[in-house]
Image: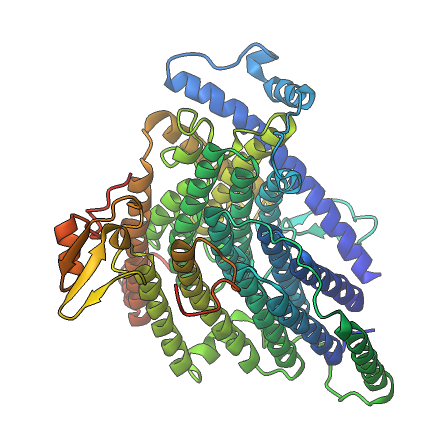
Amino acid sequence: MVPQLSWYLALSAVLFTTGVVGVMIKRNVISMFMCIELMLNAVNLTFVAFSSFFRDVTGQLFVFIVMTVAAAEAAVGLGIIISIFRNRESLDVDDASTLKL
Amino acid sequence: MLALLFILFAGMAVGCALSMVAQRNPLYSAISLIGVFISLACLYVTLAAPFIAAVQVIVYAGAIMVLVVFVIMLLNVEEEERQPVRLRTLVPIAVALAAVFFAETAFIIFFVQTSPATPTGSVSDVGLTSSIGTGLFTTYLLPFEITSILLLMAVVGAMTLARRGGLIGANVGVVPGYQSFAREVLDPMATTDLTQVEARTSREAEELLGVSDSPHGHDEG
Amino acid sequence: MEDLKHLVLLMVGILVAFTVVMTMVAYTVLAERRILGFIQGRLGPNRVGPGGFLQPIADLLKFIFKEDIVPDKSTRFIYFLAPTIVTTAALMSIIVYPFGPDVHLPFTLPLIGGNTIPLVIAKFDVGLLYVLGVTSVGVYGIALAGWSSNNKYSLMGGLRSSAQMISYELALGLGLIGVILQSGTLNLQSIVEQQSGHLGITGWNLIWVQPVGFIVYLIAAIAETNRVPFDLPEAETELVAGFHTEYSAMKFALFFLAEYVNMFTVSMLATTLFLGGWNGPFVHQVPWLGIFYFLGKVVFFLFFYIWLRGTLPRFRFDQLMSFGWKFLVPLAIINIVVTATVQWSGVFDWGAKFLKTSTGWGG
């Protein structure tokens, strides 16, 4: 049996849902960031699967750009996380839920 | 053969993803996420996209996660404590909704006709580096250039965030025309020196207090 | 059935390549100690066997029988995982290098049929990117080893070493882009085949094609493998012993082995891309010579590494990082720009055509 497109889409849905659950459950801001990366990767898998099954290179180009954007987001996001840690001494998002320092 | 490989790599991906969400120690979560990325790269290879697979390993598993692991190690992030279970009354409703969802999914899988998209049987040249390069530099040149500007912005942003000093805390008394700064506001290391100084800008205050945030001023080794 | 034959061929190839690489790495350790001894005016180990020939076996026995000490407060899982990651990542990249051209055997192979065997295990279209990816993953072993030892000196050494490795990985990748521009492909077999000029020597990518790229690659590769002059994070006199302070016996042997296999891998990549791989005089008439040429060039690079270790002092860490970011990366980018401009304008093609029409030499 050859893997069908629906198998890849189902896998991508499972990974995306796991990422969403992780973002809702986790209290540590770095763990939430990692769950966001998992969601981005699930979407990347969908793009590559469609690109492969419909013989169109556009999907893979978009994946390339998504990866670049994720790298930029990681750099700036982790910089923000380090700044928050310097000011509050805690990485708990529940402690950072108000705008007051 | 391909189905076997798909089941293997998909199982690894889902297993590592579940482990990532379930672990309380963020370093183990990071290692599980690296496992997810590598199994996704293997899946991309089975989908005849070798360039994207290699770029996934180099960029995601080799650069972004190294950054995350560095931050976890430098900030010495602790394990999360177990939380008490809240909203126990909603658990039966959640189970019922999950059962409905599984029933719907089973119905779709077994009774609905799937679309006739042909799987990758014959050799295609869509995933080769040359076709990606051609597409990136001809049809999609504008997104490519904008992405490079985005990366430049990210570099500048990261460097700005990493600079110390220049931040004003919330415990600053504000007088019109003047502002009072305590030394600990400008220099987070000096937590015992609470001398106040009047100045108009944080730069003036830094000079008066002798705290400098220029690169050759902070010579901490 | 076809899949099974393919799989068997792969397994046999991996086994042979693994054996060859491990043996050469073991004797590289011995060669390093003896050559360093000669540079420093003393003899190296020469007691075990004639000329110290059996020293690696003695070392292996010592490592196996040593007591394995695990620090009490270390995180056990990561402590055991780190040397595994480093060794696996180091060994995974030997499958894409072409050790020689297709050789003809005098007999027909029993299971597979035919009498030609390719001397490369896996023919990837993106072979070069695969090598870069695998070296990127090898950084984790060092960072995790430093962290899991529960020792602040190990952590500092591990973080410094990882920061150095990811900085020089960038310079390494950029230095290779010149070769990719000139060859037009990421496939290592094609790059080697394009370097067969006259007598197998004049076509090399080293002198005429990418001199600056070679220098950038070589310096970045020495920094990537944590060798002198870039070995501050693991030097014997700094930070106790860096990230592998708390490792003993077999796990330390794995780190040690991984460093030498990394050296070997990087030398193989330099040989393949810049020195013509298995090309040499008379290699098309006698294909078996290809292996000797390839391994000979790799041995030359290993000797160069050992020679540098005996000769140069080491960089301080901030000098190392500023050298990598402020000198090597701009130099690599300038190399890419110049190579792309020359390639696009066709200046060298015009020069070669002029040379051929005027003197009949070249082509």
Front position in the image: C14 or C155: C155
In the depicted view, which residue is nearer to us: C149 or A88?
A88
Q: Is residue C231 visible?
A: no
Q: Position of residue C25 (x, y in %)?
A: 57, 32
Q: Nearer the viewer, residue A48 or A67?
A: A67
Does residue A47 appear in this view? yes
Is residue A41 placed above or below C52 in the rendered structure? below
> In the rendered view, does C174 fall on the left or right side of C74?
left
Residue B69: image location, x then y, percent: 51, 52
Residue at 44 percent of width and 68 percent of height: A73
Which residue is located at x 85 percent, y 85 percent?
B107
Q: Is residue C190 above or below residue C28?
A: below
Left or right: where B102 falls relative to B9: right
Q: Give the residue displayed 61% in from the left and 59% down from the top.
A: B33
Residue B146 lies left or right of residue C294; in this view the side is left
Quarter the C terminus of chain B occupies? top left
Q: Position of residue C294 (x, y in %)?
A: 53, 42
Q: How many tags in the picture? A: 0
Q: What colour-coding does the image apply?
A: rainbow
**Residue B172's image quarter?**
bottom left
Seen as rendered, the residue at the extreme top is C47
Residue C162 x %, y %: 46, 45
Residue B77 position (above or below residue B50) = above
Instruction: Name the quadrant of the N terminus of chain B.
Output: bottom right
In the picture, residue C221 is in which quadrant? top left
C361 lies left or right of B200: right
